[in-house]
Image: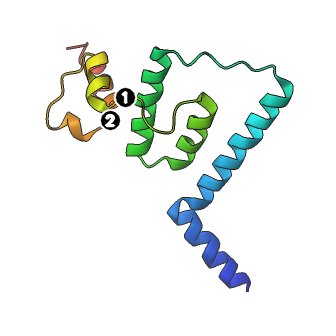
Amino acid sequence: MEELKDVLRETLENRGALGNVRAHLRAEVSNALEDRSGSVKRPELSDENLVINELIREYLVFNRYRSTLSVLLPETGQPETPPFDREFLAREMRIRENETSKKLPLLYTVLSNAQRGGK
């Protein structure tokens, strides 16, 4: 029975499911504590926050950071369905994309441009 538990735990861990459950539980505990204390006020979900959160979401999805994403969405109040498509985000950030950059999250292009001095 112990061997079966170990195999199951390892399988769930490898699939990322166990991490997702842990992250979701942490997010729920954090939200419950915030609701109870009422002392932590989140910033308003402005247009700028929506854009920044979407850039982060795209990065997390690309890198398969599912646990982090499962905490980010409820903690920020970001809609489950992305409010902006990639083309809109690229226009907002004034990013000109090419075939290579389209395969990566926009944050990689922002970093690359900053490293080249904004060129």
Q: Is residue 21 shown left or right of residue 55? A: right
Q: CA distance from mark 1 to mark 2?
A: 14 Å
Q: Nearer the viewer, mark 1 or mark 2?
A: 1
Could you tell me which quadrant the N terminus lies in?
A: bottom right
Task: Indicate the secondary structure of the residue bearing disc 1.
Answer: loop
At x 57% / y 44%, what residue is drawn? Answer: 70
Where is mark 1, residue-wise? 84
**Residue situated in front as seen by the camera: 107 or 116:** 107
Q: Residue 58 lies in what quarter of the image?
A: top left
Mark 1, Cα crowd under 10 Å, few <14 / some 14-19 / many 20+, is few
> Which x, y percent locates residue 72?
57, 36
Residue ID for mark 2: 105
Q: Amino acid at mark 1?
A: Phe
Vertical placement of residue 15 versus 92, above or below: below
Q: Residue at x 57, y 60 (%)?
A: 17
Q: Residue at x 45, y 40 (%)?
A: 60
Residue at position x 62%, y 75% in the image: 8
SS for tag 2?
loop
Q: Looking at the image, is mark 1 or mark 2 earlier in the sequence?
A: 1
